[in-house]
Image (cartoon, rainbow, N blue to C red):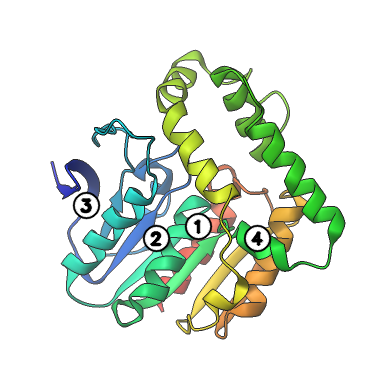
Amino acid sequence: MPTIRVEGHDFYFFEKNGKSPTIMMLCSTGLDSRQWKDLLPMVGERKLISPHYLNYVKSSSWQKKSPIDSWIDYRAAEGLLLAEGREIDLIGHSYGGFIALRLAKEHPDRIRRIALHEPIVWGCLQHTNRDDLKNEFGEVVETFFKEDLEPEDFLRDFVDYWNEVGSWDSMPEGRKGSWRDLQPKILSEVRLLCYDTTPPSYYEEISHPTLITVSESTPPHQYEACNILSSSLPNVKVIDVTGGHMGVVTNSGEVMPLLARWVND
């Protein structure tokens, strides 16, 4: 079982051997490499890697007494990137998009092309002129981090937020159990993303050919953050798709081919 060790924690990563350049697939919060199953036949004989984040299936749980530090997920992805020793392509969704953009910024000579579905870049919202969207985002943060919010209620709020009301309650019990096990780590990831203060100017030097797919049915403040990001990137193509934030999974027949074609060029 392939793993990479980071700060005393073992991170499992899915690996499929193949031709260069390698594609690293970076997952959304709550999901693992299985979210990319529909993509695999679209990228031919390419080598693929996809890390499972801390606390996720086959990876270590947090070993320290201090609160979970989700930045360790970035450091694991960074270790995999540097181990490749050559340029690779990045595909990311949501939290995975957040990680991918940082890899590209910090290691520009190691990245060839980038394809993202709705990366989370909520620090950009500090620079919107839309006070209504700032307020909307503030309400979301208050909901997620309400004092004395029960873990189950946090998961319900989170899943319904990205899907539709009732999505948590209709989820199969076995899958709910997996999410319950991940709840402390999911909370840590959401805290990292919600309190991110990275300005749009941070992304201006990411000159790699970048595709961003985004859906108008995503939450309005998320759509705005992606628009601000797109305006900051010097070499970007934006494609509107259907299916909302989770469209890369629920509407994979539309979104996955776009991501695959971009990195196949």
Residue at the extreme top of the image, as rendered: 173
Q: Residue at x 48, y 67 (%)?
A: 115
Q: Nearer the viewer, residue 206 or 142?
A: 142
Q: Position of residue 100 (x, y in %)?
A: 42, 63
Kindly identify which residue carries mark 2.
Answer: 42
Q: Residues within 10 Å of mark 4 (few under 14, many from 20)?
A: many
Task: Tell me if label 1 and label 2 are in contact, CB under 8 Å.
Answer: yes
Q: Which mark is residue 256?
A: 1
State the CA–CA distance, disc 1 to disc 2.
8 Å
Q: Amino acid at mark 4?
A: Val
Q: Position of residue 61 (x, y in %)?
A: 27, 31
Kindly identify which residue carries mark 3.
Answer: 15
The quarter of the picture where the N terminus appears is: top left
Kindly identify which residue carries mark 4.
Answer: 214
User: In the structure shown, which secondary structural element does the residue marked by tag 2 occupy?
Assistant: helix
Q: Is residue 33 left or right of residue 114?
A: left
